[in-house]
Amino acid sequence: MMNSIERIASTLKFEKPDRVPVIAQVFGHAAAVAGMNLGEYIQDGELLAQCQTKALDRYGYDAVFALMDTYVETEAVGSVLTYFKNKYPVVKSYALDQDTDPDTLSVPDPHYAGRMPDLLNAAGILREEVGDEVLVVGCVLGPLTVATQLLGIEKALYLAIDDPERFSRVLDFATDVVIRFGIAQIDAGVHLPVVFDPSASPAVIPPMFFSEFELPRLARLFSSLKAHGAAANWLHIAGPVGPVLPFYPEAGVDIANFDYCVSPLVAQEALDKTVLDGNIKPWSFVEAAPEEITLESSRLLDQFAHRGGFILSSGCEIPPESRQENVAAMVMAARTR
Amino acid sequence: MSDPSLNLLVEYLVDGDRKRSLNEVKNLLDSHVEREKIVTDGVEVAMKRLETKCTVEQFNLLEIMVAGRAAMEVITFLYPQDRPSPPTKGTIVIGTPEGDVHDLGKNILKMVLTAEGYRVVDCGKDCPLDMLADAVKREGARAICISGLITPMIPLVRQVKNKLAERGVRDVRVIAGGAALKQATAKSLNVDFVCDTAFDAPGYLEKITGRG
């Protein structure tokens, strides 16, 4: 029997692993599993690692996540967040405005800035805990998502239209931020950081905008991570990602997440040599019955049985309030196949 | 019916070109085209064109934002605060429930509804349900549109009809949209309709009233 790392490595080579890997996108849900508050979980690396380990023991899937929320980078640059007891934080004030000269900004040091050190701490603890048995996944945001978190999404997108040169420099700065943060995560112990880029979704921007602004920067990010030892390049863009999937190989993507609204056939056709992960509807982990999750998992496993190169997963984050028996049902579907 | 004399304005608006749109509106006013006609045959036609484009190619927020911004500037230019308001198809209350500070979707919906000829009362983001329900009653709204990006909003949205009923409001349509809410069905959300895109809201309103 393979361990999780061997299983995922085999999948990346489109070989036949002992079973299909299953990675539940359990982030804040790990706090719920451990009976802890989400607000503490995303501010305390040690607690985060403990909760992730408990969730791994509970579910037995193939990856753990050193991942807090989507505001770590912007906070490190200077945005101010509001924290809550039991939900994800929100941005109270953004670090930049449209008049900020990006050249005056300095890239934060992940060992000192905001919660970056806490996330590195979580990464180190998790790696020590699971060694090379289970995949330890960190997280950086994509450059476009960082830019939208630095300015606020409306200001950022209007800036892209009204002053593309300045916006490009903000994107370049954002790319530098996430390269440095991603490399620090690898040094701290993650096997790879997933690149989470919700603002680059075709629900938000047209594919031409993606190819012009985001693609070259994603390529620079992924080549830097790979050069520093990332086990694979994993890109996670939520929503109707079909139109931009063909750009992924040029960005250097090895694993592509696809959301519930993307047909597995469309994803397979767009990416014949890229590992795909997805795509159970996140909300169904809250509302559906375990039998429905089992059925949906089996349907996906059938659809990828011939192709291979598949990791069973949700389309996006499994909501913190999800029913544990639903997460367990997805994991069991892969494990008992 | 679209009017060929407004074709240029429609093009500029669909492209989101604010400067050219405003210049063209000035030309049209100089040619004695009525303000109301510029809205109905110019701005509303542009929004329909954009809706068709988004259906054929793929809906994305950026193009709607840019066109919507140009449309809002045209409407504000035609009807500044010291002029009587334009005729409307009715009042719609919109908001993002308490706990959700993401308001891009709501802001886009506001632009789309305004450009389609509705009067929009924007209750903002992170808005308590009681405040939303009070606004519906106070403003005599035809519908309330709730936008939500995150799943913890779902239990809140289920309460909206009860909040309206507590105020004796029973004939107002409740419409939901946004990344989290559109994963659920109208029945499970206890609403009348779930939008996939911002254009679905005016589409639904037209369907239930049989008018555009």
Image (cartoon, coloured by chain):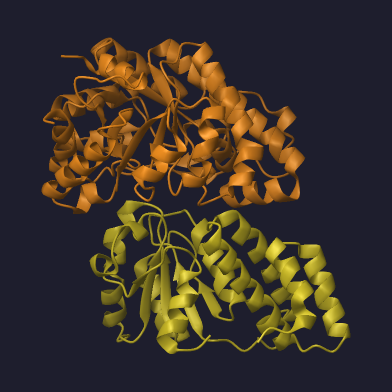
Chain colours: A orange, B yellow
Count of numbered marks: 0
Q: Quadrant of residue B85?
A: bottom right
- Viewer-side residue, B30 vs A129: B30
Q: Quadrant of the N terminus of chain A?
A: top left
On the rendered image, what quadrant is the C terminus of chain A found in?
Answer: top left
Q: Is residue A196 left or right of residue B45?
A: left
> For the point 52% across and 24% down, which residue is it?
A252
Foreground residue, B84 or B190? B190
Residue that appears at 71% across and 61% down: B15
With respect to residue A73, does B75 lie above or below? below
> Is A283 displayed left or right of A57 in the figure?
right
Return the x and y of residue A313 as percentages of the image width and height. Answer: 28, 36
Up-down relation of residue A211 to residue A287 (above or below): above
Residue appearing at x 60%, y 52% in the figure: A154
Which residue is painted at 61% across and 75% down in the image? B115
On the question of residue A39 being in view, the answer is: yes
Is residue B107 visible in this depiction of the protein?
no
